[in-house]
Image (tube, rainbow, N blue to C red):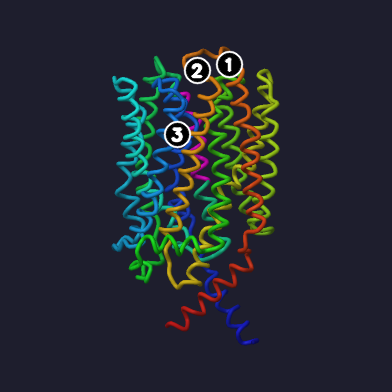
Amino acid sequence: MADTVVSATTAAASVSHGRLSLHTKLAFGAGDLSPAIATIIISFFQLFFLTTVAGLNPAAAGSILFIVRIWDAFNDPIVGWLSDRTRSRFGRRRPWILFGAVPFGLFFFLQWLVPPLGPTGLYIYYLVMALLFSIAFTVVNIPYTALTPEMTPDYDERTNLNSFRFAFSIGGSLIAGVLHQIIVNSAVDPQTGYVIAAAVWGVVAVPPFVWCFLGTREQHQSASDAERMPLVEQLRAAFSNRPYQFVIGIYLFSWLAVQVTSAVLAFYVTFWMRAPDLIPIMLLAVQGSALVFLFIWSAVSRRIGKKAVYMIGMTFWIGVQAALFFIQPDQTPLAIVLAALAGVGVATAYLIPWSMMPDVIEYDELETGQRREGIFYGFMVFLQKLGLGAGLFLVGLALEWQGFDQNLDIGLQPETALIAIRVMISPIPAVVLICGMVLTAFYPITKAKHDEIRARLAQRQTHEM
């Protein structure tokens, strides 16, 4: 028994030296810059653009984004499965990032044009463009996210690696969230402003992917039985992984809260606060605070663990969401302070679920002897898109039901629409976040458990040599 303990300890030590250089972490982080820019603009502005600029009614605009998410249910796992099976001298994931870069930028741009078509033609155009962009997003983002466990086996180093990833993510969100509205407002009309802004972000999107491709390397490229398993069988095996069930639930609730809040924020600030110029400031407060707390929470998690960090961050965030319902239109300074406090919790929603994913994948490897990062991350990215699509769809549908009229000016919206906006930015996200906290309390992989998993994997590799 003592020999087994010593052997396990030695094995654990042998896999703990997965430290990465600063330039590798920066290159890896850059891979999430462009998806973050696209996501923040879509989250905060796409529903607003489709209704107030393109002229679609809220329900039709929301349905476009929801249909795309249904497509992603098939698209995302397939790309993840294909990336697991890819073999090249550049690795399994990195070629996808490189070759998907230009289509990503192009199809992002095309979503923001307003062609001279009638309501039906515009609906079809935006649906097709959204589908094409979704494919481009999947092609780069799923292989990118699946890089994490392949770059380092170290438990804490993975959290640190994700800190760099989300530093770029939140930094990109911060820059785009603030500058996008400034670019739009600087044009002669909103339609022209959105075209100019889309062109800027479409061009900016390409270089970070190239940097990520050139600056990263993959450790695990050996063949496995997972490559020969049918896609449906792999999905079934993935969903039998109990820790994975917890992680996808935690992430879905976290991201749904983020997206409902994001989708309704522009409406809240414009039609309830009656201060549309406040949108960039609110985004700056939320994303700036989240950027700072990414590194604070990463350091704290080394001492108290991922679960405790998530619980503390969510408590902050739920308090903010509750307070937003009671904010009055003349309380602008208080709204900005609350936005900054929300960033404390938003940082944990970015950091913790993604930091749990590599541990889940290694649990699966221990149980099955296979590595299938693409499948696991494919469904996680699908959940991210589902949260985005569901948030936009639900906000659009609720606004339609409560009488929101995109043709009415600020101050003229019906009281029912204003109440709906306040409910969607306050109690609804708060309840969703509480559900995520309940799941986190029962998440089974602690740091000690992960050390045990890594030690047993190392022992297995030693016996196979």
Q: Position of residue 240 (x, y in %)?
A: 50, 63
Q: Is residue 180 magenta?
A: yes
Instruction: Answer few, some or many: residues within 10 Å of disc 3's Cα (few below 14, many 20 plus, some between 14 and 19).
Output: many
Q: Secondary structure at mark 2?
A: loop
Could you tell me what secondary structure mostly forms the magenta stretch? helix
Report the residue marked by disc 2: 405
Q: Which residues are magenta?
A: 167-182
Question: Which circle's residue, 2 or 3, is located before the other in the chain?
Answer: 3
For the residue pair 276 and 442, the one nearer the viewer reads as 442
Q: Amino acid at mark 3?
A: Ile
Mark 2 or 3: in front is 2
Task: In the rendered view, tell whether residue 415 sits above or below residue 289.
Answer: above
Image-based side of 84 in relation to 366, left or right: left
Q: Which mark is residue 414?
A: 1
For label 1, the crowd category at 10 Å Cα-Cα, with few meaning under 14, some 14 to 19 and many 20 or more, is few
In what quadrant of the picture does the N terminus appear? Answer: bottom right
Kind of residue at disc 2 = Asp
- The residue beneath circle 3 is 42
**CA–CA distance between discs 2 and 1?**
8 Å
Residue 50's x, y, as percent?
42, 25
Q: Can residue 186 be seen by looking at this rendering?
A: yes
Dot 1 falls on a residue whose secondary structure is loop
